[in-house]
Amino acid sequence: MWQLVVFALASAAPAEQQNLTFDGEAFGARRSLTCTWFTNFENSRFEQCRDAAGKLLQDGDGASIKCVRGLCEQLDAAARKAIGSKKPEPPWGTFTVTLVGRISLNPHEKRYLGDATRNILIEKLTSVSSAK
């Protein structure tokens, strides 16, 4: 009986509070984030992210980036605009990104130099500015 009640309450939670599986990976609840993004011709990752409660990633780790509905392309375009680049290539630099997204629930081993143990799923891009 209690299991049924708990399930009913869990399924009644708003979508932003529920976990999500995207591309075979489990992500936590949706939240507003401000992240420092480093990108160049071979790496693209969030070096640190914060929410209202504080830092979310371990120092020296970071998070790889996943996006829904073409948001990775929008992120690149917004970064190129922030630095005044008209080139179609991926932007280079460090940027401050505000977004709505989710953090992967399960860390993984780093797969290559510059990789991170977490992923962040971008569901809404709010702003991108050069961190200079």
Image: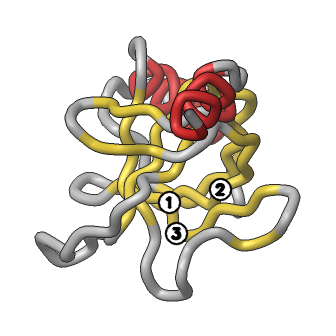
The residue under label 1 is 46
Circles 2, 3 touching at the beta carbon (< 8 Å): yes
What amino acid is labelled 2 in the image?
Cys
What amino acid is labelled 3 in the image?
Glu
Question: Which comes sooner in the sequence, label 1 or label 2?
Answer: 2
Circles 1, 3 touching at the beta carbon (< 8 Å): yes
User: Residue 84: in sight, yes or no?
Assistant: no
Q: Nearer the viewer, residue 71 or 132?
A: 71
Q: Residue furthest bottom?
A: 59
What distance separates the C-alpha of mark 2 from that of mark 3?
Answer: 7 Å
Q: Residue 35 bears which disc, if any?
A: 2
The residue under label 3 is 47
Residue occupying image coordinates x 67% and y 45%: 97
SS at circle 3:
strand
How busy is the neighbourhood of tag 3: few (under 14 within 10 Å), some, or many (20 plus)? many
Residue occupying image coordinates x 35% and y 62%: 106
What amino acid is labelled 1 in the image?
Phe
